[in-house]
Amino acid sequence: MSTQSDADPDVVVLREGTEGLSMASYADALRERLPDHAVAHARTPAEERELVPRARVVTGIDIDPDLLDGADRLDLFACTFAGTDHVPTEALAEHGVAVTNAGGIHAPGIAEQTVANMLVFARNLHEGWRRKTNGEWRHFGSREFTDSTVTVVGLGSIGQAVVQRLDGFEVETIGIRYTPEKGGPTDEVLGFDDADVHEAFARSDYVVLACPLNDLTRGIVGEAELATLPPNAVVVNAARGGLIDTDALVSALQTEGIRGAALDVTDPEPLPADHVLWELENCLITPHTGGHTPKHWDRLADIVASNVAALDDGGELENAVVRPDADG
Protein backbone atom coordinates (compact mmCIF):
# COMPACT_ATOMS: atom_id res chain seq x y z
CA MET A 1 0.00 0.00 0.00
CA SER A 2 1.34 3.42 -0.90
CA THR A 3 1.64 5.94 1.92
CA GLN A 4 -1.67 7.70 2.53
CA SER A 5 -1.35 11.46 2.28
CA ASP A 6 -3.23 13.93 4.44
CA ALA A 7 -5.47 14.77 1.48
CA ASP A 8 -8.88 13.14 1.27
CA PRO A 9 -8.89 10.14 -1.08
CA ASP A 10 -10.85 10.33 -4.31
CA VAL A 11 -11.45 6.57 -4.39
CA VAL A 12 -11.42 4.07 -1.53
CA VAL A 13 -11.23 0.33 -2.25
CA LEU A 14 -12.72 -1.71 0.57
CA ARG A 15 -10.98 -4.74 2.03
CA GLU A 16 -13.33 -7.64 1.19
CA GLY A 17 -12.40 -9.38 -2.04
CA THR A 18 -14.31 -11.57 -4.47
CA GLU A 19 -13.61 -14.77 -6.43
CA GLY A 20 -10.24 -15.13 -4.71
CA LEU A 21 -8.96 -11.92 -6.30
CA SER A 22 -6.81 -9.42 -4.45
CA MET A 23 -8.38 -6.05 -3.70
CA ALA A 24 -4.87 -4.60 -3.66
CA SER A 25 -4.65 -5.56 -7.35
CA TYR A 26 -7.96 -3.81 -7.95
CA ALA A 27 -6.61 -0.67 -6.29
CA ASP A 28 -3.50 -0.86 -8.48
CA ALA A 29 -5.67 -1.19 -11.61
CA LEU A 30 -7.60 1.93 -10.59
CA ARG A 31 -4.38 3.87 -9.94
CA GLU A 32 -3.17 3.02 -13.45
CA ARG A 33 -6.36 4.46 -14.91
CA LEU A 34 -6.63 7.42 -12.53
CA PRO A 35 -3.10 8.80 -12.22
CA ASP A 36 -4.39 12.22 -11.21
CA HIS A 37 -6.63 10.90 -8.44
CA ALA A 38 -5.80 9.57 -4.98
CA VAL A 39 -6.77 5.90 -4.69
CA ALA A 40 -6.58 4.32 -1.22
CA HIS A 41 -6.96 0.68 -0.23
CA ALA A 42 -8.63 0.21 3.15
CA ARG A 43 -7.09 -3.04 4.37
CA THR A 44 -8.72 -3.21 7.81
CA PRO A 45 -12.05 -2.26 9.44
CA ALA A 46 -10.26 0.63 11.15
CA GLU A 47 -8.97 1.95 7.81
CA GLU A 48 -12.47 1.66 6.34
CA ARG A 49 -13.90 3.69 9.23
CA GLU A 50 -11.18 6.29 8.68
CA LEU A 51 -11.22 6.52 4.89
CA VAL A 52 -14.85 6.00 3.81
CA PRO A 53 -16.16 9.21 5.41
CA ARG A 54 -13.46 11.16 3.51
CA ALA A 55 -13.92 9.55 0.11
CA ARG A 56 -15.73 10.71 -3.01
CA VAL A 57 -16.02 7.18 -4.44
CA VAL A 58 -16.09 3.92 -2.50
CA THR A 59 -15.90 0.55 -4.25
CA GLY A 60 -16.36 -2.95 -2.89
CA ILE A 61 -18.84 -5.76 -2.37
CA ASP A 62 -20.92 -3.88 0.19
CA ILE A 63 -20.78 -0.79 2.39
CA ASP A 64 -21.66 -0.38 6.06
CA PRO A 65 -24.59 2.07 6.33
CA ASP A 66 -23.16 3.32 9.63
CA LEU A 67 -20.28 4.86 7.69
CA LEU A 68 -22.58 7.05 5.60
CA ASP A 69 -23.53 9.60 8.26
CA GLY A 70 -20.17 11.30 8.13
CA ALA A 71 -19.48 10.70 4.43
CA ASP A 72 -20.29 14.20 3.21
CA ARG A 73 -18.07 13.93 0.10
CA LEU A 74 -19.39 10.56 -1.04
CA ASP A 75 -20.97 10.69 -4.50
CA LEU A 76 -20.72 7.08 -5.67
CA PHE A 77 -20.64 3.53 -4.36
CA ALA A 78 -19.32 1.21 -7.08
CA CYS A 79 -20.36 -2.35 -6.24
CA THR A 80 -17.95 -5.03 -7.43
CA PHE A 81 -20.84 -7.47 -8.03
CA ALA A 82 -23.38 -7.42 -10.84
CA GLY A 83 -26.17 -7.97 -8.31
CA THR A 84 -26.85 -5.27 -5.72
CA ASP A 85 -29.68 -6.83 -3.69
CA HIS A 86 -27.35 -6.99 -0.69
CA VAL A 87 -26.34 -3.32 -0.94
CA PRO A 88 -28.14 -0.72 1.26
CA THR A 89 -29.34 1.19 -1.80
CA GLU A 90 -32.11 3.05 0.03
CA ALA A 91 -29.70 4.38 2.64
CA LEU A 92 -27.24 5.38 -0.08
CA ALA A 93 -29.97 7.16 -2.05
CA GLU A 94 -31.08 9.01 1.08
CA HIS A 95 -27.53 10.31 1.43
CA GLY A 96 -27.46 11.37 -2.23
CA VAL A 97 -25.03 8.62 -3.23
CA ALA A 98 -25.30 6.97 -6.64
CA VAL A 99 -24.79 3.20 -6.97
CA THR A 100 -23.27 1.36 -9.92
CA ASN A 101 -22.63 -2.33 -10.45
CA ALA A 102 -20.22 -4.63 -12.26
CA GLY A 103 -22.72 -5.70 -14.89
CA GLY A 104 -21.15 -6.83 -18.15
CA ILE A 105 -17.67 -7.68 -16.94
CA HIS A 106 -18.52 -11.38 -16.71
CA ALA A 107 -20.33 -11.58 -20.04
CA PRO A 108 -17.45 -12.92 -22.20
CA GLY A 109 -16.63 -15.79 -19.84
CA ILE A 110 -20.26 -16.73 -19.24
CA ALA A 111 -20.96 -16.62 -22.97
CA GLU A 112 -17.97 -18.81 -23.77
CA GLN A 113 -18.99 -21.38 -21.16
CA THR A 114 -22.58 -21.33 -22.41
CA VAL A 115 -21.55 -22.05 -25.99
CA ALA A 116 -19.13 -24.71 -24.75
CA ASN A 117 -21.95 -26.48 -22.88
CA MET A 118 -24.12 -26.53 -25.99
CA LEU A 119 -21.27 -27.99 -28.02
CA VAL A 120 -20.68 -30.65 -25.36
CA PHE A 121 -24.25 -31.83 -25.79
CA ALA A 122 -24.14 -31.47 -29.57
CA ARG A 123 -21.08 -33.70 -29.88
CA ASN A 124 -21.91 -35.87 -26.85
CA LEU A 125 -18.50 -35.13 -25.36
CA HIS A 126 -19.61 -35.92 -21.81
CA GLU A 127 -20.20 -39.52 -22.92
CA GLY A 128 -16.67 -39.54 -24.36
CA TRP A 129 -15.28 -38.34 -21.02
CA ARG A 130 -17.15 -41.09 -19.18
CA ARG A 131 -15.78 -43.75 -21.52
CA LYS A 132 -12.28 -42.37 -21.13
CA THR A 133 -12.61 -42.59 -17.34
CA ASN A 134 -13.62 -46.23 -17.74
CA GLY A 135 -10.88 -46.94 -20.26
CA GLU A 136 -13.42 -47.89 -22.92
CA TRP A 137 -12.59 -47.53 -26.61
CA ARG A 138 -16.19 -47.71 -27.83
CA HIS A 139 -17.73 -45.45 -30.43
CA PHE A 140 -20.81 -43.39 -29.67
CA GLY A 141 -23.12 -41.23 -31.74
CA SER A 142 -23.10 -37.44 -31.86
CA ARG A 143 -25.24 -34.67 -33.26
CA GLU A 144 -24.49 -31.48 -35.17
CA PHE A 145 -24.92 -28.03 -33.70
CA THR A 146 -25.42 -26.71 -37.23
CA ASP A 147 -29.06 -25.92 -38.08
CA SER A 148 -30.09 -25.98 -34.42
CA THR A 149 -32.47 -23.39 -32.98
CA VAL A 150 -31.19 -21.60 -29.88
CA THR A 151 -33.50 -19.49 -27.73
CA VAL A 152 -31.73 -16.94 -25.54
CA VAL A 153 -33.90 -15.74 -22.67
CA GLY A 154 -32.67 -12.25 -21.84
CA LEU A 155 -30.79 -9.99 -24.24
CA GLY A 156 -28.73 -8.00 -21.79
CA SER A 157 -24.93 -8.03 -21.83
CA ILE A 158 -24.70 -11.80 -21.29
CA GLY A 159 -27.42 -12.70 -23.77
CA GLN A 160 -25.92 -10.44 -26.41
CA ALA A 161 -22.47 -11.94 -25.82
CA VAL A 162 -23.92 -15.43 -26.31
CA VAL A 163 -25.63 -14.43 -29.56
CA GLN A 164 -22.46 -12.76 -30.81
CA ARG A 165 -20.51 -15.99 -30.26
CA LEU A 166 -23.15 -18.06 -32.01
CA ASP A 167 -22.53 -16.13 -35.22
CA GLY A 168 -20.77 -18.50 -37.59
CA PHE A 169 -22.28 -21.70 -36.16
CA GLU A 170 -25.13 -21.61 -38.70
CA VAL A 171 -27.87 -21.77 -36.08
CA GLU A 172 -31.21 -19.98 -35.88
CA THR A 173 -31.62 -17.74 -32.85
CA ILE A 174 -34.69 -16.55 -30.96
CA GLY A 175 -34.38 -13.84 -28.35
CA ILE A 176 -36.79 -13.25 -25.47
CA ARG A 177 -36.75 -9.79 -23.95
CA TYR A 178 -39.01 -7.45 -21.97
CA THR A 179 -39.45 -5.09 -24.92
CA PRO A 180 -39.53 -7.24 -28.08
CA GLU A 181 -40.57 -4.23 -30.16
CA LYS A 182 -36.99 -2.97 -29.76
CA GLY A 183 -35.72 -5.93 -31.75
CA GLY A 184 -32.32 -7.38 -31.05
CA PRO A 185 -29.35 -9.34 -32.39
CA THR A 186 -31.29 -12.59 -32.80
CA ASP A 187 -33.08 -13.76 -35.93
CA GLU A 188 -36.41 -13.35 -34.12
CA VAL A 189 -37.38 -11.51 -30.93
CA LEU A 190 -40.33 -12.43 -28.70
CA GLY A 191 -41.54 -11.28 -25.30
CA PHE A 192 -41.84 -12.76 -21.81
CA ASP A 193 -45.56 -13.48 -21.95
CA ASP A 194 -46.54 -17.15 -21.69
CA ALA A 195 -47.63 -17.47 -25.32
CA ASP A 196 -44.29 -16.16 -26.64
CA VAL A 197 -42.22 -18.27 -24.24
CA HIS A 198 -44.03 -21.46 -25.23
CA GLU A 199 -43.85 -20.54 -28.93
CA ALA A 200 -40.08 -20.16 -28.67
CA PHE A 201 -39.57 -23.25 -26.52
CA ALA A 202 -41.60 -25.44 -28.86
CA ARG A 203 -39.07 -24.73 -31.62
CA SER A 204 -35.89 -24.85 -29.53
CA ASP A 205 -33.07 -27.34 -29.53
CA TYR A 206 -31.29 -25.29 -26.88
CA VAL A 207 -32.63 -22.77 -24.34
CA VAL A 208 -30.13 -20.41 -22.72
CA LEU A 209 -31.21 -18.58 -19.58
CA ALA A 210 -29.40 -15.23 -19.37
CA CYS A 211 -31.98 -13.00 -17.67
CA PRO A 212 -32.20 -11.51 -14.16
CA LEU A 213 -34.19 -13.27 -11.45
CA ASN A 214 -37.31 -11.32 -10.54
CA ASP A 215 -41.03 -11.82 -10.00
CA LEU A 216 -41.60 -12.19 -13.75
CA THR A 217 -38.81 -14.65 -14.45
CA ARG A 218 -38.79 -16.80 -11.31
CA GLY A 219 -39.61 -20.37 -12.39
CA ILE A 220 -39.81 -19.37 -16.06
CA VAL A 221 -38.71 -22.94 -16.82
CA GLY A 222 -41.27 -25.00 -14.96
CA GLU A 223 -43.28 -28.14 -15.55
CA ALA A 224 -45.40 -26.60 -18.32
CA GLU A 225 -42.44 -25.10 -20.17
CA LEU A 226 -40.42 -28.31 -19.93
CA ALA A 227 -43.40 -30.17 -21.38
CA THR A 228 -43.42 -27.78 -24.33
CA LEU A 229 -39.72 -28.31 -25.08
CA PRO A 230 -38.95 -31.04 -27.63
CA PRO A 231 -37.43 -34.20 -26.11
CA ASN A 232 -34.10 -33.40 -27.82
CA ALA A 233 -33.88 -29.98 -26.12
CA VAL A 234 -31.11 -28.89 -23.74
CA VAL A 235 -31.52 -26.18 -21.09
CA VAL A 236 -28.46 -24.10 -20.19
CA ASN A 237 -28.78 -21.93 -17.07
CA ALA A 238 -26.10 -19.25 -16.97
CA ALA A 239 -28.01 -16.77 -14.82
CA ARG A 240 -29.77 -17.66 -11.53
CA GLY A 241 -30.93 -20.97 -10.11
CA GLY A 242 -34.42 -19.72 -9.30
CA LEU A 243 -35.25 -19.37 -12.99
CA ILE A 244 -35.83 -23.13 -13.08
CA ASP A 245 -38.24 -25.26 -11.04
CA THR A 246 -35.64 -27.76 -9.86
CA ASP A 247 -38.10 -30.57 -9.09
CA ALA A 248 -39.68 -30.22 -12.52
CA LEU A 249 -36.24 -30.26 -14.16
CA VAL A 250 -35.23 -33.41 -12.28
CA SER A 251 -38.39 -35.14 -13.45
CA ALA A 252 -37.84 -34.08 -17.06
CA LEU A 253 -34.24 -35.30 -16.99
CA GLN A 254 -35.12 -38.61 -15.34
CA THR A 255 -37.90 -39.40 -17.82
CA GLU A 256 -36.01 -38.10 -20.88
CA GLY A 257 -38.60 -35.38 -21.30
CA ILE A 258 -35.62 -33.29 -22.42
CA ARG A 259 -32.17 -34.37 -23.56
CA GLY A 260 -30.17 -32.60 -20.90
CA ALA A 261 -29.29 -29.56 -18.85
CA ALA A 262 -26.12 -27.60 -18.12
CA LEU A 263 -26.30 -25.69 -14.85
CA ASP A 264 -23.77 -23.15 -13.64
CA VAL A 265 -26.31 -22.04 -11.04
CA THR A 266 -28.80 -24.10 -9.05
CA ASP A 267 -31.71 -23.82 -6.65
CA PRO A 268 -30.72 -24.46 -3.92
CA GLU A 269 -27.18 -23.12 -4.19
CA PRO A 270 -24.75 -24.49 -3.24
CA LEU A 271 -26.25 -27.75 -4.43
CA PRO A 272 -26.27 -30.26 -1.53
CA ALA A 273 -23.90 -33.18 -1.95
CA ASP A 274 -26.78 -35.68 -1.78
CA HIS A 275 -28.95 -33.92 -4.38
CA VAL A 276 -30.22 -36.15 -7.18
CA LEU A 277 -28.95 -33.75 -9.88
CA TRP A 278 -25.39 -34.90 -9.15
CA GLU A 279 -26.34 -38.44 -10.15
CA LEU A 280 -27.92 -37.63 -13.52
CA GLU A 281 -25.60 -38.28 -16.45
CA ASN A 282 -27.59 -35.88 -18.65
CA CYS A 283 -26.99 -32.94 -16.30
CA LEU A 284 -23.72 -31.00 -16.37
CA ILE A 285 -22.99 -28.95 -13.25
CA THR A 286 -20.38 -26.29 -12.55
CA PRO A 287 -20.22 -24.42 -9.20
CA HIS A 288 -21.17 -20.91 -10.40
CA THR A 289 -17.84 -20.45 -12.17
CA GLY A 290 -19.07 -19.19 -15.55
CA GLY A 291 -18.21 -15.59 -14.84
CA HIS A 292 -14.70 -16.19 -13.54
CA THR A 293 -12.12 -14.27 -15.54
CA PRO A 294 -8.56 -13.09 -14.93
CA LYS A 295 -9.68 -9.80 -16.50
CA HIS A 296 -12.18 -9.11 -13.69
CA TRP A 297 -10.37 -6.12 -12.18
CA ASP A 298 -9.28 -4.67 -15.52
CA ARG A 299 -12.84 -4.57 -16.83
CA LEU A 300 -14.29 -3.27 -13.57
CA ALA A 301 -11.56 -0.65 -13.21
CA ASP A 302 -12.38 0.61 -16.71
CA ILE A 303 -16.00 1.16 -15.65
CA VAL A 304 -15.15 2.81 -12.33
CA ALA A 305 -12.49 5.07 -13.88
CA SER A 306 -14.99 6.12 -16.55
CA ASN A 307 -17.50 6.95 -13.83
CA VAL A 308 -14.97 8.99 -11.88
CA ALA A 309 -14.46 11.05 -15.04
CA ALA A 310 -18.25 11.34 -15.38
CA LEU A 311 -18.47 12.69 -11.83
CA ASP A 312 -15.79 15.26 -12.67
CA ASP A 313 -17.50 16.30 -15.91
CA GLY A 314 -21.15 15.94 -14.95
CA GLY A 315 -21.65 13.07 -17.39
CA GLU A 316 -23.87 9.96 -17.24
CA LEU A 317 -22.76 7.10 -15.04
CA GLU A 318 -22.17 3.71 -16.64
CA ASN A 319 -23.98 0.74 -15.02
CA ALA A 320 -26.03 3.03 -12.78
CA VAL A 321 -28.37 1.20 -10.40
CA VAL A 322 -29.33 4.17 -8.20
CA ARG A 323 -29.39 7.75 -9.46
CA PRO A 324 -30.35 9.96 -6.51
CA ASP A 325 -31.56 13.51 -6.98
CA ALA A 326 -28.88 16.12 -6.78
CA ASP A 327 -30.30 17.37 -3.49
CA GLY A 328 -30.09 13.86 -2.00
Image: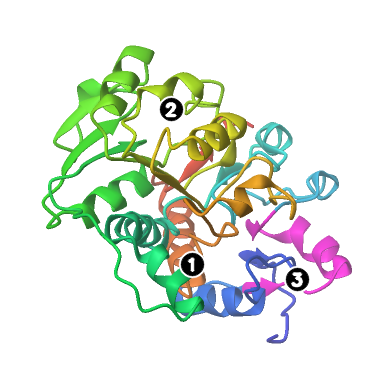
* Marking on residue 21: none
Instruction: Find the distance from the CA under tag 1 to the CA under tag 3.
Output: 17 Å
Instruction: Find the distance from the CA under tag 2 to the CA under tag 3.
Output: 49 Å
Q: Classify 219 as above or below 77.
A: above
Q: Residues within 10 Å of mark 3 (few under 14, many from 20)?
A: many
Q: Which residue is mark 2?
A: 226
Q: Is residue 138 left or right of residue 77?
A: left
Q: Is residue 200 left or right of residue 296?
A: left
Numbered disc 3: secondary structure = loop
The quadrant holding residue 96 is top right
Residue 35 at least partly seen? no
| Magenta stretch in the rendered image | 39-61
Q: How many discs appear? A: 3
Q: Classify 109 as above or below 83.
A: below
- Say which of 14 and 238 sits in front: 238
Query: Mark 1 belongs to which amino acid?
Result: Ala
Q: Residue at x 70, y 47 (%)?
A: 275
Q: Which residue is mark 1?
A: 301
Q: Nearer the viewer, mark 2 or mark 1?
A: 2
Comes first in the chain, label 2 or label 3: 3
Asked if marks 1 and 3 touch (Cβ < 8 Å), the reply is no
Comes first in the chain, label 2 or label 1: 2
Q: Residue at x 65, y 77 (%)?
A: 22
Rendering coords of residue 252 (x, y %): 49, 33
- Residue 57 is inside the magenta segment: yes
Asked if marks 2 and 1 touch (Cβ < 8 Å), the reply is no
Quadrant where the N terminus is found in the figure: bottom right
Query: Mark 3 belongs to which amino acid?
Result: Ala
Residue 191 at least partly seen? yes
